[in-house]
Image: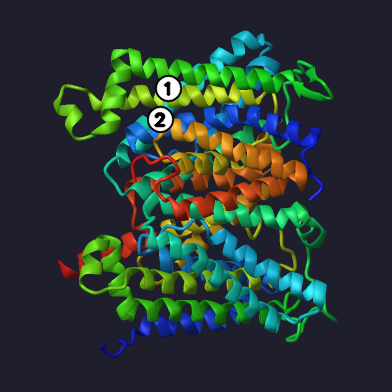
Amino acid sequence: MSAPRFNPGYVIGLALMIAFPFIVTTFFPSSQKYYLHLAIQILLWAFIYTGWSLMGRFGLTSLGHGAFTGIGAYITVLLWNQTGLTPLIGIPVAVVTAALLGLLVGYPCFRQRITGHYFALVTLALTEFVRLVIVGMRDLTGGSLGTQPQRYGDGISIYAVQFEPDRMLAYYVALVMWVIGLYIWWRVDRSMDRFALDAASQDEDAAQSVGIDVTREKLKITALSAGMCAFGGAMFGQYQMYIGPDTIAGLSVSLNMVFAVIAGGMYVMLGPTFGAFFTQMLAETLRVAIQSSAWLKSTLGSSALALDSAIYGLLLILFIIYMPKGILGTAIDWWEKRKSR
Amino acid sequence: MDCALDIFFLEAVLNGLLLAGLLALLALGLNLIFGVIDVVWICYAELVMVGMYAIFHFHKTAGMPLVLAIPLAILAIAFAGILLHTLIIRPVLDSAPINQLLVTGGVLFLLQAVATMAFGVEFKNIGLQLGSLPVGEMRFSWNRILTFLVALAAMLALWQFLRRTYIGTAIRAISQDRQIMPLMGVDSKQVYLITSAIGGGLAGLAASLMVLQFDIYPQIGLQFGPLTFMICVLGGLGNMVGGFIAAFIIAQFITIGGSCFATEWGYAIAFLFFMVMIFWRPQGLFGGKA
C-alpha cells in the first residue's frame, strides 16, 4: 500500500476545527453555547452518516440504520437507568449488540443475495421492528414519549459519560468521534476489502468467481457500520440527555441518514460530513429566518416547522435526478475536470 | 399467555380478516406499480394520506357530500399518480433501482411536510360512524365490514380489468417482458401512465376506506407504509395474488398478537415473522420474480 499522501489542507482544516470553540468564544461570547451546540450536532450526525455511508457506498442501501442508532442509545440509557451500569461498559455492550444484530440480519440477506430495493425494504422492516419493540416496552423505555438518562452529580462525569452542561467538552468529544469516524472511512477506503466490495457491488458472480468471499466481506462492513451507528446513537443520547423512538430510532432517522449522505456525496470521505452540515444548517437557517421574520411567522404559523422537511424532500428528489453524486462529490468531480484540462 | 381459544380470540381472528381486506388493497396498488413499472413507490402510503386529507377537505371544509367527495379524491390521487410518474419516475427510469426507490423517499418527505403545513399536526376525523353489527357476544363495526367488502370488490374489478380488456392485457404483457413488448407494438410509455393512474386511483380508494376507520394525521403513512411494503415483499414483489394472501397472514399476526399483548407487539411480531420468512424464501412466499 502506498504511503498516505499528506494533504496540507486536512491539517489546516483540523487545526481550524480544534480552534473553533476559541474563535467562537472570542468573537461571539454571548452566543457561544448556541454555535457550539450546532457544531456538536453536526459532528455527531456526521459520525453516524459516515458510518452509514460505509455500507451505502457499496450499494448496500440500508434503511435499517435507524434501528442501530436506536439500539445504541436505548441499551446505553436503559442499562444506566435500570441497573446503574456505567455507559463506559453500557456503550460497548450496545455497540456489540448492534453489530451482532447487523450480522444476524445481514447473514441471511447476503447469503440469499437480497440486494437493491429488496435489501432496503428488508432493512426497513428491521427499523420498524426495533422501533415497535422500543415503544412496546413502555414500562422501561417511556414508550413514544422517550426517556432521559439519569443525571449523575452535576451532569459532567466520565463515569456516567455525561458532558452536556460543558459545551466546550462536548464539542471536543464530538470532534474526536468525528475524526475517528473519518479515520475508519479512510482505512476502509484503502483496504483490500474496499476493492472486494466494489467488485461485489458491480457484479456479485464475477466477484465470487475470482475468489472473493462476498458474504464475508459484506458482513464485515455491516458489523462495522452498525457498530458505528450504535456508538453515534449512544453518544447522541448522552449529549441530548433525552432519547425518543422518533428522534434516535425509526424510519425517519433512517431516511434522514440516506438523504443527508446523498446530498453530501456518498463516495467521498467528507461527503457524509458535508451532508450533515448541509441538512442541519438548512433546518437551522429556516428556523432562524422564520423566528426573526414576523411576516413569515404569521403566514406560515405553526406549519413553519414542516417547511424544512418540505425543502429536504424537494432537494432529495432533485439531487437523485440531477446530482446523484451529491454536492461535494459533484464539486470534486468538477474541480478535477477543471484541473486536468 | 392468557389468550386461549375464547370469544376474544375469535373476535381477533375475524377482525384480522377485516383488516386484511384493507391491507390487501394497499398492497395491490403497490404491487401493480412494481409489477409493471419495476419501481417501488416508497411514498405510496403518503399518497393514501393525501387522499384522506382530500376527502376531509372536500367533505368538511368545502361541504360536499361524501358520495361526491370520495370519487373526486380518487380522481385527484389517480392524477397525482400520473404526476408522480411523469415528473419524478420517468427521469430515473434508467437509473439504479435503489435510486428510484430513494427518489420517491423524497416525495414521502415532501408530501408529509406539505400536509403538515396545509392541515397542521392535529388528528382529524370525518366523524362518520355506521354503528356495529352484533354477532353473538361479538361486535363488528360496519365501517370495517364495508371496508372489507369494497376492498374485495375493487380487487375483483382490477382482476377482471387485467383479464378482459385490451389495455389490461397490454399491462400484463409489459409486466412479463419489458424489452420485447414495445417491439410488439405496445406503447410502454402509455401503459406506464395508465398503470400509474390506476395505482394512484387504488391509493385514493384505500384512502376513502381508511377515513372510515382511522384519524387523519400527516404521519399516518409511516404507520401503514412499512406494513404495505412488508406484505408486498412477503407475497413476492409484483405478485398480486401473493400480496393478497400475505395481507391475510400479516393481519392475523397483528390482530391476534395485538389482542394477546399490546398493539405494538402485534406489529412487532408481524415484522419479525416477515424477516424470518424473507430469509427463508427471499423471493417471497409465493414465488414470483426474484
**Subunit under mark 2:** B
Residue with the mark numbered 1: B198
Residue projecting furthest to the front: B5
For badge 2, the amino acid type reads: Leu
Badge 2 vs badge 1, beta-carbon distance below 8 Å: yes
Q: Is residue A289 above or below residue B34?
A: below
- Which residue appears at 74% of the width and 71% of the height? A77
Using the rendered image of the protein, determine whether residue A296 is visible from the camera's viewpoint. Answer: no
Tell me, for residue B176, which label it has, or none: none
Residue with the mark numbered 2: B32
Q: Answer with the quarter of the image where residue A189 lies.
A: bottom left
The spot of residue B90 in percent (x, y) is 31, 35
For badge 1, the amino acid type reads: Ile
Using the rendered image of the protein, determine whether residue A141 is visible from the camera's viewpoint. Answer: yes
Judge by depth and name the residue closer to the eye, A266 or A144.
A144
| Label 1 Cα neighbours within 10 Å, binned few <14 / some 14-19 / many ≥20 | many
Q: Is residue A294 left or right of residue B77?
A: right
**Subunit under mark 1:** B
- Which residue appears at 77% of the width and 61% of the height? A141
Judge by depth and name the residue closer to the eye, B59 or B6.
B6
Q: Is residue B234 above or below residue B136?
A: below
- Which residue appears at 71% of the width and 80% of the height? A87
The spot of residue A90 in percent (x, y) is 69, 78
Q: Answer with the quarter of the image where residue B91 lies.
A: top left
Mark 2–mark 1 Cα distance, whole angstroms, equals 9 Å
Quadrant where the N terminus of chain A sits is: bottom left
The spot of residue B131 in percent (x, y) is 79, 17
